[in-house]
Amino acid sequence: MNPVQDTLAEADIAGNPLDQVVQHLRRGETLQAQTVINLLHTSEMASLLESLPRELRKQTWDLILPGNEGEVLAYLGEEARSTIIDEMAHHEVVAAAETMHDTDLAVVIDELSETLSEAVLQSLDADRRLRLEATKAYAEDSVGRWMSSDVISVRQDVTLQVVLRYLRRLKPLPTHTDALMVIDDNGQYLGKLSMSEVVTEAPETLVGELMKPMADCVRVDANDHDVAVLFERRDLISAAVIGERGELLGRITVDDAMDIIRGEADKAVLARAGLHQEEDLFAPVVPSAKRRALWLGINLATVFLAAWVIGRFEEALDKIVALAVLMPVVASMGGIAGSQTLTLTIRGLALGQVSRTNLRWLANKELAVGLLNGVAWAVVVAIVTYAWFGDTGIALIIAAAMILNLIAAAFSGVIIPVILDRFGYDPALSGAVVLTTVTDIVGFLSFLGLATLFLL
Amino acid sequence: MNPVQDTLAEADIAGNPLDQVVQHLRRGETLQAQTVINLLHTSEMASLLESLPRELRKQTWDLILPGNEGEVLAYLGEEARSTIIDEMAHHEVVAAAETMHDTDLAVVIDELSETLSEAVLQSLDADRRLRLEATKAYAEDSVGRWMSSDVISVRQDVTLQVVLRYLRRLKPLPTHTDALMVIDDNGQYLGKLSMSEVVTEAPETLVGELMKPMADCVRVDANDHDVAVLFERRDLISAAVIGERGELLGRITVDDAMDIIRGEADKAVLARAGLHQEEDLFAPVVPSAKRRALWLGINLATVFLAAWVIGRFEEALDKIVALAVLMPVVASMGGIAGSQTLTLTIRGLALGQVSRTNLRWLANKELAVGLLNGVAWAVVVAIVTYAWFGDTGIALIIAAAMILNLIAAAFSGVIIPVILDRFGYDPALSGAVVLTTVTDIVGFLSFLGLATLFLL
C-alpha cells in the first residue's frame, strides 16, 4: 500500500465505531480496536457485536473487559448471545452471569445447557437463587418478569429527617430512584413519596402527610404491554409492583417500559415479514433459510389458491388475452387499499381506540372511503384500458371489478383484524396475509367472472 | 326498555372507558360520562376523543374540565386537534394555550388561524413569548424542539448544604429532576450532579467533587432520533442540552425520548401503507379518500408497468393459458422473500448495524439464503405444476423463474434500502413499493420470457 492510499484509509476510519473496529482488526491493530470498543456503553457494544459476521464477532468479544461481559450478554439478542456463549469457557459464563441483573439472568439461564445453568445456579448465593426462582415463576409477558427488587421502602409515621438519615446509610441509591415506596408494618403498599419532596419539604414533616396514597402501582401479574402504555401516558419514572394482597414486591422503572415499547415495535415490523424477533443479522445461511421457509410456504399456499381461482377461468383467458395482462391490476389495487384500512384498524386496536361501540362507525367510514377511491380509480383504469386495448367491454368490466374489490378490501381491512384479535391471534402478525388472500381472490374472481358473464 | 334489558345494559357498561362514555352519552347520563372522563389522565382523555366520531367528540370535549383542556389538546393528533379547535371560542383557545408547555405550544400555534395565533401570542407574557420564538427557531427534527427550559443549575464551588437550601426555595421542583446541571459563571455546562448524591452525601461536600464532568449532554441541533437512541441505550432520565459554545440551554427528559421512539414506530407502520402519521381514525370520508388516493395512484403506476411487461408476452399467453394461471406465483414469492431481506436491512440501517464495512457480507448471506429457498420452493412449485398441468416444460420453467426471482429479491432487498438511505430517502417509506415493483417485473419477465424462449 502506498502512502497516499494509507492516508486515505486513515481518514476513512473516522466513521462510526463499527467501521473503526473492523478497520483496526483488519490491520491487526488490536489495541486501537479495544480502545474504540471500551469507550462504548455496554448496550452499544452489544449492538456492535450483532453487526459483525461470526468470525469477527468472536475476535471482538475477546476485546471486551470481563467486568462488562455480563451486561453485554444481557443486551444481545438471543441468537447472537448463544453464538458467543458457545465459544466461552464455563467459568467465564459463570463469572459473567454473576454480574447480571436478576431479570436478565432469569432470561439467559433458560438458554444455557443443563450443565452450564447448573454451574451458574451453584455460584449464586442462596438469597439470589431465591429471587431468581421467584422471577422465573411469573408468566413471560407479566410485570413480574421485569420487576426489580431494589426498591427503597419507608414507613408513613417517620419524619423526612429520619428518611434522610436512612438514605445516607443506604448509599449509593439504586438508579432511577425518583420516589420512595411507603409501606405499613405488614409490608402493604400505601403510597409513593417523591424524592423531590424529601429534599424540599421541612425535615420534621411526616412521610404520611406527603405521600400520594396508592399512586402509580401495578399488579405483579399485569400484562407488560399495558404497563408500558401506562408509563408512556403518565410519564412515570418508576411504579410500585404489588402482589395479590397489596403487598409491595418490587418496582418497575422507565427503562424497562422503554425496552418493552421498543421490543413490541421491533416485533411488529419483523413479524409482518414472517421474521422472528431474535433474528440475527448474521445468522448462518442454512438456519436462516429454514426459518424463513415457513413463511414462504404459507404464502405459496395462498398464491396457489389464487392461481386455482384464475384456473377456473381458463376459457375466458384463452379467448381474451388482455384479461391475463390486466388481472394483476385489480388484485394489486385491492391489496393496497385493504392494507391501508388494515393498518389503521390494527393500530386502533393496539392503542385501545377500536372497541365494540365504534366498530360500526369505523366500518361505515372505511367502506365509504373504499367506494370513493374505487370509483375514482376505476375511471382512470377504464380510460387506460380503453386506450391500450380499444375495447369498451373490457374497460367497463375492469372498472366494475375495481370498485367491487376496493369495497371488499375496506370491509376486510376492518373485519379481519377484529376477528383475529377476538380469537386471540395478533392481527399484526397474520392480518396482512389473510387480507391479501381475500383481495387477490376477490380481484381475480370479480374481473374474470364479470368478463366470463358479459364478454364470452 | 323492559327492566331485564336495562340490567343487561347496565352490566355491559363495565367495559373500557370508551364504551362507558358512549353508553352514558347515549342514555343522556351526562354527569356519569363526565365522571368517567375526568378520572382519566389527560393523555387518556385525548386517546378517548380520537376514538370517537366527530359528533360525539364535540359532546365529549365539553365534559372535560377547562383546566385540562390545554394538555388534552397537546396530546391529540394534529387532525383531531383541529376539529376541536374549530369548535372552540377564541377565548377558550387562548385560555387552553396558556396552560400548555412551551414545546407543545410551539407546535400547536403554527396550526392556528392567523387571528387566533395572534390572540394567543398577545396573551403570553414577554418572557414566554421569547422562549416560544426560540423553540420555533430550531429545526423540526432537532432536540431544540423538545428541549424544556425548566432546568436547575448550580455552581461547582458551593456545598451540598447550599444546594439543598436553594432547592427548598425552588420547590416544587420540575418533574423528572433526577439530576442538577453544574455550570460555571458564564453558563457553560460542566457536568451533572445526581439528586441521589445530593441527598446521601455529606452536606459539606462541594458540588465540584461529586459531579460527573460533561456527562450526558447533547447539542441543541442534534437529531432527535439519535438522542432517543442515546436515552434508550444509556437508560437516561434527563440530559443537558448545550449550545454551540457549550452553554447550558435546557434539558430533555426521558418522556420526550419515549414520545420520539413511539412516534417513529408509529410513523414507520403507517407510512408503509402510505398513511400520514396524524391520520385521524374518524376523519371525514372525502379528505380521507383524497389522502389515500396518492398512494393508490403510485401503486397503480407500478402495477401498470408490470402489466405492460406481461403485455409483451401476449403471444405466449395466447398459446399456453397455463402461463396466465401460474404467473402470479412467481411474482408473489419474490415479493415475500424480498420483503424479508428488506425488513432486516431497513432495521439494521435504523439501528446503525448496517454500514459500509459489513454490507457485502450481508448481501452475500442474503443471496445464499435466497438461492437456498429459491431451489427448495422451486422443487415444490415444479411438482405442483406438473401434477396440475402435466407439462414438464412449464414445470421446469416455473422452477427456473422462481430461483431467478428469489435471487433478484435478495439482492434488491439489500441494495434498495441502502441506495434510498444514501440519497436521503427513508427506506421504511418507499422501500417496499420499489421492491415489489422489481420482484413483480423480474417474476413476470423471467417466467414468461423463459416460456417464450423454450416453449413456443
Image (cartoon, coloured by chain):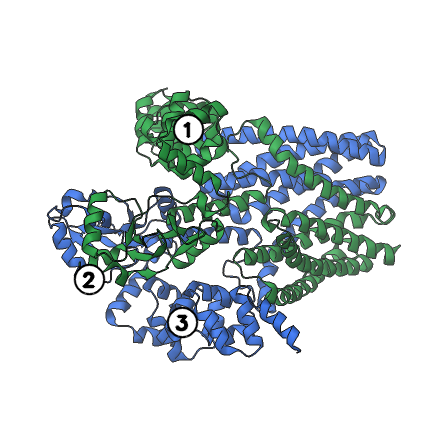
Chain colours: A green, B blue
Q: Disc 3 marks which residue?
A: B69
- The residues bearing labels 1 and 3 have C-alpha atoms spaced at a distance of 54 Å
Q: Quadrant of residue A128?
A: top left
As drawn, is B172 to the left or to the right of A135?
left
User: What percent of the width, then of the height, locates residue A256?
Assistant: 41, 46
Quarter of the picture holding the N terminus of chain B = bottom right
Q: Which of marks 2 and 3 is nearer the N terminus?
A: 3
As drawn, is A432 to the left or to the right of B105?
right
Tell us which disc is closer to us: 1 or 3: 1
User: What percent of the width, then of the height, locates residue B303?
Assistant: 67, 49
Does A127 sit above or below residue A173? above
User: What percent of the width, then of the height, locates residue A23?
Assistant: 38, 26
Does B205 sit above or below residue B66? above
Q: What residue type is labelled 2?
A: Leu
Q: Give the residue displayed 54% in from the left and 27% down from the top.
A: A284
Q: Disc 2 marks which residue?
A: B170
